[in-house]
Image (cartoon, rainbow, N blue to C red):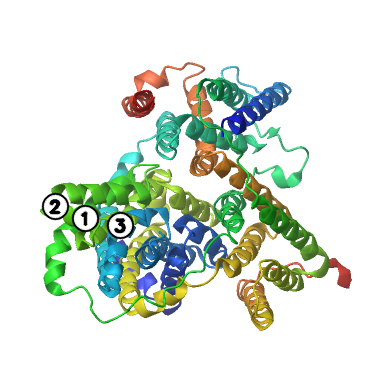
Amino acid sequence: MLKADRIFSVILGVISIIIFYLSSNFESGFIIDSGLGADFFPKSVSIILFILSSILFFKSFSTKEYSKGIFSKNSKILGITLCYFFVYIVLINIIGYLLATILFLIGMFKFLKIKSNKFILFYSLIFSILIWYIFNNIFNINLPIGTIYY
Amino acid sequence: MFEHLIQGFVTAISPMVFLYLILGVIGGVIIGALPGLTATMGVAILLPFTFGMEATTGLIMLVGIYIGAIYGGSISAILLNTPGTPASAATCFDGYALVKRGMATKALSTSTIASVVGGMISCIALITISPILAKFALRFSAPEYFALALFGLTIIASISSENFLKGIIAGIIGLLIATVGMDSITSYPRFTFDRIELLNGFSVIPVLIGLFALSEAFNQIENLFAEKLVDVSNIKIDKNYLSLKELKKVFPTMLKSGVIGTFIGSIPGAGADIAAFVCYNEARRGSKNPEEYGKGSLEGIAAPEAGNNGVTGGALVPLLTLGVPGDAVAAILLGALIMQGLTPGPLLFEQNPEVVYGLFSSMILGNIILLIVGLFGIRFFSKIVEIPKAVLIPSIIVLSTIGSFSMNNSMFDVRITFIFGILGYIFSKLKVPNSPIVLAIILGPMIEENFRKSILMYEGSLSFLYTRPITIVFLVLTLISIISVLKKTKQKN
């Protein structure tokens, strides 16, 4: 945890410096002298973030707690899920929402070791079609049809 | 006021609206009952279903989901000893003890009645207090709003995390996220990297869905193969409901907890989980038989359940009157209000009384529906908790995707949800709480805009910080909340 805190605080510190630098480049075309420009708030917040992340950084040295990694072996399952999800998002644009959702659900259920193929097929089809129907036909939201069909 | 309230009831009982309210309550109960799915997640993933509806109808359905989800958490707490939502963690102690003694129906019916009593008390408080508070808040100007938002943010950061530093860091991250987009006063595009989609900043709803629904799903999927399958086949559901005699005995506890819950709910940042624990401890402290607590005491179920449902109305008080969300769920409701083109705050009572009073009356009706669903649905509940996570999690991902898409018909928002889902997951691993981030995204623009407006009002001077009484009160409260947390942290060390 402490090692993770240290890395986290360094990342936050770097982000705060970048934000401060970027906000310094904001053009201040403000007419009234007494007004604060667009850069005031992000600059102040980035300074506070820098101070807080420094405290977190130094604190991570002073406490003697058992340090262990934050990710477990099981993170692999999550990694694969994220890949599936990413592909799903890409596929929605290409083959359309309905088909992509059906494929995503079938793929995920197979990966998560659901045994009954009948259930997988039945649930994926019904769930996807139901969601698609509700949003497309009842709420009139135009879900992506897919670029492949043009 | 009564005229508006009656008008509100007329809206809420029109067939379609009433149907959506019933569906909302049932949907909320189901999501709340699923172990590991929080009420916040429930509202976040069901929110998109209200996008296509008219403003009042959509909000009424959301309120139904909220009431149902907070109650639903008690079902898995009682049947499985696993709280469906953190708000029901205190219900496990006595609820599961009763189940082990073969009295599942009694435990569930106690929790239903307690939830409804708590909910009703909070409705009454909401209906009576908020119009008065809204009238008072009409006097607020930029400096008061600045101080109020600042107070809301510090109290949220201090309550929501065991580690104050990380709570505040979470709040600051939220404030930075809130700066993306066109500056509200000078219209200068900040951190938009020439993307048109970012000109209006991050849309709150996709960020919320990412942080609360997706990140939870990611957390759950990690332990999927390690968890045992739920088996409730040995739990006996009979007809042994809470008797009138027992109800008479626990009723005072329900009333007291409902009042405490409502009060806690109305404090920005303190939500249902805190209310439940405070009510449980308070009931045990004042009980004639404290030794029974943890062994299947009916009061031990009634107190946290009346307390956490008491929060539902309480959390809406600051949301509707001041535009400051009381907890994470209220933050989502705020997002929904804004999406429907409404501005929460004192003016809402004057400009859109039909929405406000429609919400009030639907809360009362929602609680009555909850009573019916809760008492008659006991047999079905034992089936809901058996749904395996391997089926749930992919479904949540699909719902999150369509939810973020349907807000602006944009795949860009889906990608935002994806990114915030991963960020939320990493934050939870680092023990950085998610709620301050979201509340800061909402309060950030309020803090910035009102601070800069105040400076303009006072022609560059900071004197508004110490010359306006209400502003001073809020700033002093902010200081007190920071100092008390710092003191507590010191004591711990």
Which chain's residue wears label 3?
A: B
**Mark 3 touching mark 1, by CB under 8 A?**
yes
Q: Nearer the viewer's eye, disc 3 or disc 2?
A: 3
Q: Nearer the viewer's eye, disc 2 or disc 1?
A: 1
How far is mark 3 from mark 2, CA to CA?
16 Å
**x%, y% of residue B260?**
24, 49
- The C terminus of chain B, quarter of image: top left
Q: Is residue B186 visible?
A: yes
* Vertical comparison of B288 with B243: above or below: above
Quadrant in the rendering for residue A105 = bottom right
Closest to the observer, B405 or B488: B488
Q: Which residue is mark 1?
A: B293
Amino acid at circle 1: Tyr
Q: Residue at x 68, y 27 (%)?
A: A19
**x%, y% of residue B406?**
65, 62
| Circle 3 crowding by C-alpha within 10 Å: few under 14, some 14–19, many from 20 | many
Q: Residue at x 50, y 18 (%)?
A: B459
Amino acid at circle 3: Phe
Amino acid at circle 2: Ser
Quadrant in the rendering for residue B357 = bottom left
**Mark 2 touching mark 1, by CB under 8 A?**
yes
Q: Which residue is mark 2?
A: B287
Q: Which mark is residue B209?
A: none
Q: Which residue is mark 3?
A: B93
Tell which circle, 3 or 2, labels the residue nearer the N-terminal end. 3
Tell which circle, 3 or 1, labels the residue nearer the N-terminal end. 3
Which chain's residue wears label 2?
A: B
- The N terminus of chain B, quarter of image: bottom left
SS for dot 1: loop
* Vertical comparison of B466 with B473: above or below: above
